[in-house]
């Protein structure tokens, strides 16, 4: 697959691409599409895409730019990695998320003369099949994230879902109320209802994660441990931190392993201010990295590189 140039990547329609990530506009005013920010948690849409210019601006963080600028923030990666992701978006036949274009309206939705949104049935993710993990593409993705299949299989499923009339296969991590967090190398989204995931190991302490790959990394790091893991809570969204306070405070100690970005640090500090004797920030363990999985990937790669160097010296 030939990688796109920066100029080619900038031609990708941002409204279509956000739809592929399961972000739909909250309102539309002519060429301005307003979203709940994909880059942070919020309740009022303050992320604007001007479709004519194909640029975005997030008023909450005061940043904006083109689709490449968005990708580097959204995926927390380099420009080269963003170009690879966007190339796969355009060329991967099973991940073509471009919704049908509706004359006079918005892709994936129709709007009346006053601009009110009318939902189209196929614009929502519909889970159609759930089974054990087996697809090679998903297993390869887990390997890239340094998660052993035996650990992922304990908590995740292989999910078929339909979006805009097309079926796709991803890793699904179930929450407490029947929804799934959905991930593959080129897709990040969730099915309704959105909720937290609590793993009850009958302990008096709890570890709290922002996303499920951090939780799976925690399990991977501790896989040789004979004692039961602590209870675990995967928020699946930082917006659930407040809602989860009662559950967390049923435990003697709450170990916070949230992301090390601005939003994660802000919510960690918020929890610490509730009770610094009960809540403990454990994110310094992976302080130079975005999250626990990012640390795991780099740590394993460094270990493997060191082992190769040792073998060469022999």
Image: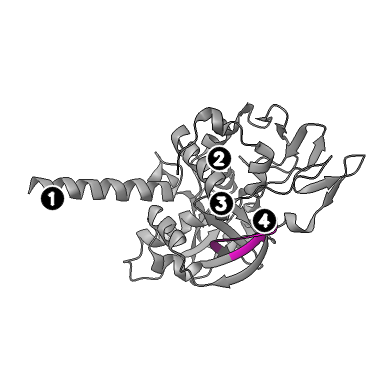
Query: Which numbered tag is attached to residue 243?
Result: 4
Q: Position of residue 105 (x, y in %)?
A: 82, 41
Whether 23 is drawn above or below 54: the answer is below
Would you name the residue on which mark 1 appears?
Answer: 311
Whether 25 is drawn above or below 93: the answer is above
Labels 1, 3: front one: 3
Segment colored magenta: 160-172
Residue 2 position by quadrant = top left
Helix, strand or loop for disc 2: helix
Q: Residue at x 46, y 54 (%)?
A: 214
Whether 84 is drawn above or below 223: the answer is above
Q: CA distance from mark 1 to mark 4?
A: 51 Å
Helix, strand or loop for disc 4: loop
Q: Earlier in the sequence, mark 3 or mark 4?
A: 3
Q: Residues within 10 Å of mark 1 (few under 14, many from 20)?
A: few
Q: CA distance from mark 1 to mark 3?
A: 38 Å
Would you name the residue on which mark 2 appears?
Answer: 74
Q: Position of residue 184 (x, y in %)?
A: 51, 55
Residue 69 position by quadrant = top right
Labels 2, 4: front one: 2
Q: CA distance from mark 2 to mark 4?
A: 25 Å
């Amino acid at each position: 697959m030939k990688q796109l140039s920066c100029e080619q990547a900038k031609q990708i329609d941002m409204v279509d691409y956000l739809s592929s990530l399961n972000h739909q506009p909250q309102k539309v005013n002519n060429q301005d599409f307003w979203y709940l920010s994909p880059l942070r948690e919020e309740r009022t849409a303050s992320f604007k895409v001007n479709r004519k210019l194909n640029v975005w601006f997030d008023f909450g963080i005061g940043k904006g730019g083109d689709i490449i600028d968005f990708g580097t923030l959204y995926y927390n990666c380099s420009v080269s990695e963003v170009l690879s992701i966007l190339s796969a978006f355009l060329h991967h036949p099973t991940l073509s998320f471009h919704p049908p274009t509706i004359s006079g309206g918005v892709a994936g939705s129709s709007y009346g003369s006053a601009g009110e949104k009318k939902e189209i049935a196929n614009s929502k993710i519909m889970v159609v099949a759930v089974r054990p993990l087996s697809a090679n593409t998903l297993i390869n993705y887990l390997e890239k994230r340094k998660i052993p299949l035996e650990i992922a299989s304990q908590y995740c499923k292989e999910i078929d879902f339909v979006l805009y009339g097309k079926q796709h296969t991803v890793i699904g991590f179930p929450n407490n109320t029947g929804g799934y967090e959905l991930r593959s190398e080129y897709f990040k989204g969730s099915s309704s209802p959105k909720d937290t995931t609590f793993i009850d190991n009958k302990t008096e302490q709890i570890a709290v994660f922002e996303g499920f790959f951090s939780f799976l990394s925690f399990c991977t790091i501790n896989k040789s441990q004979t004692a039961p893991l602590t209870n675990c809570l995967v928020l699946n969204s930082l917006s659930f931190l407040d809602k989860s306070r009662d559950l967390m405070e049923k435990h003697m100690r709450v170990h916070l392993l949230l992301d090390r970005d601005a939003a994660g640090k802000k919510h960690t500090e918020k929890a610490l201010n509730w009770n610094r004797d009960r809540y403990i920030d454990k994110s310094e363990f992976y302080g130079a990295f975005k999250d626990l999985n990012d640390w795991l990937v780099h740590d394993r790669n460094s270990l493997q590189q060191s082992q190769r160097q040792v073998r060469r010296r022999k």
